[in-house]
């Protein structure tokens, strides 16, 4: 290996992001509850649109995603010219870091925030700055106190992954107002659709010129495998992000399926209602077994075990029962397991297995 060949500073500080496991060797009848996917899959309309796209596979896809942006704008009451689409919201996060943060700059995120924020910061040569939360809830005062003249981006997932908690509209507004003038607030709304009546931060984007919202088709729309996300922001920021976006960053099949998915509002409504019902049932069942969780606003529950040893043992027990959940030690929560809210049968299986685990411990 040549000692002269070195990556850019910061790159080797990135710990590899590991996605949720999807199978366990030697265990059958598994259910994957480790990546916050929609247990009902994608809507039929999205699948049909995907199939139709097969006939045009030899064509390059749309480079401006005009039809998809128009659909997103129409359904959400937004301005299509201020929407940018990416290969998952991960790509929008990366664009923001590349375009606005570099060597000597700081990127602020919260203690149990999504790992792609520090990865994006390091990849851009900037310094990630992690801010303490208050009992697994973002602390606006602490975030504002951490901002300096070098802060270029502040990332906040609302609801947050993996805690499931969120802050209210007035706190979001206070955060946006209090930022230094050179900083952009990025409200990551990957789980926004699970919160009845929440706009994901869209109204704050409309009201200010320093706020960007990111959204995804990977969660409630059930299209994680296709990689589609989007961002909404002031025109001057979206225009900058488009300069670094590859012209064909989304496949034609992904564009077609996402457009159909966003228009299928009945499906989204049904998934939201099911999630709300099953989430409440699961959280209560776990609490009765002595496994508390914070009130989740997303499609997962962060189950708190006594300590890391118990969390590891519970994770292994569930795995042997075919239930794949997520350890979140890399998010600073070693005593917790993040469990995606599956369909009713999966939730019952989880509760049953945790009861057996707790019983075996006595
Ligand atoms: N933000 C948050 C908070 C997430 O949990 C995720 C997915 N794990 C993403 C963004 C990225 O989602 P995607 O790239 O699939 O759109």
Image: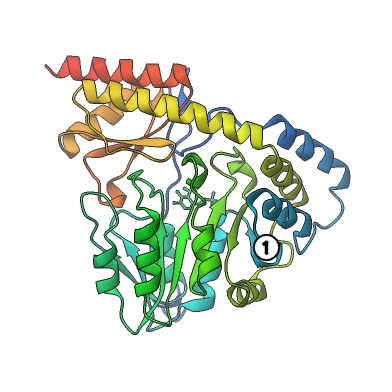
Residue 135 position in % (x across, y down): 21, 49
Q: Residue at x 37, y 80 (%)?
A: 180
| Near-viewer residue (170 or 73) | 170
Describe residue 111's horizontal placement relative to residue 117 as left or right.
left
The crowd level at tag 1 (other Cα within 10 Å; few <14, some 14-19, many 20+) is: some
Residue 235 is drawn in which quadrant?
bottom right
Residue 353 is drawn in which quadrant?
top left
Q: Residue at x 86, y 54 (%)?
A: 59
Q: Residue at x 42, y 48 (%)?
A: 18
Q: For numbered disc 1, what is the local secondary structure?
A: loop
Q: Residue at x 58, y 72 (%)?
A: 234
**Residue that label 1 marks:** 79
Judge whether 239 appears above or below 160 on screen: below
Judge whether 161 appears above or below 121 on screen: above
Visible in this render: residue 223?
Answer: yes
Describe residue 299's horizontal placement relative to residue 283 as left or right.
right
């Amino acid at each position: 290996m040549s000692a002269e060949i070195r990556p850019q500073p910061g790159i080797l500080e990135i710990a590899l992001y590991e996605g949720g496991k999807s199978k366990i060797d030697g265990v059958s009848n598994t259910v994957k509850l480790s990546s916050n996917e929609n247990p009902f899959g994608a809507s039929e309309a999205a699948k049909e649109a995907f199939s139709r796209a097969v006939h045009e596979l030899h064509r390059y896809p749309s480079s401006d995603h005009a039809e998809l942006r128009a659909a997103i704008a129409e359904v959400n009451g937004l301005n299509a010219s201020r929407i940018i689409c990416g290969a998952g919201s991960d790509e929008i996060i990366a664009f923001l870091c590349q375009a606005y943060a570099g060597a000597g700059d700081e990127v602020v995120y919260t203690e149990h925030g999504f790992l792609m924020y520090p990865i994006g910061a390091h990849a851009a040569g900037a310094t990630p700055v992690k801010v303490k939360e208050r009992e697994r809830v973002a602390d606006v005062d602490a975030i504002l106190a951490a901002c300096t003249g070098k802060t270029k981006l502040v990332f906040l997932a609302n609801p947050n992954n993996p805690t499931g908690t969120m802050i209210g509209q007035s706190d979001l507004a206070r955060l946006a107002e209090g930022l230094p003038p050179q900083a952009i607030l990025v409200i990551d709304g990957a789980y926004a659709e699970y919160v009845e009546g929440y706009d994901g931060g869209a109204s704050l984007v409309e009201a200010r010129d320093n706020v960007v919202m990111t959204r995804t088709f990977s969660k409630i729309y059930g299209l994680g495998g296709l990689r589609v996300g989007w961002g909404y922001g002031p025109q001057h920021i979206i225009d900058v992000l488009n300069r670094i976006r590859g012209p064909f960053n989304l496949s034609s099949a992904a564009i077609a399926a996402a457009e159909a998915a966003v228009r299928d509002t009945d499906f989204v409504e049904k998934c939201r209602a099911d999630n709300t019902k099953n989430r409440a049932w699961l959280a209560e069942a776990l609490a009765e077994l002595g496994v508390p969780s914070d009130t989740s606003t997303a499609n997962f529950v962060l189950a708190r075990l006594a300590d890391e040893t118990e969390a590891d043992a519970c994770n292994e027990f569930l795995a042997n029962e075919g239930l794949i959940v997520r350890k979140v030690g890399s998010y600073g929560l070693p005593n917790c397991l993040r469990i995606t809210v599956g369909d009713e049968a999966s939730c019952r299986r989880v509760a049953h297995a945790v009861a057996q685990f707790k019983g075996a411990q006595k």
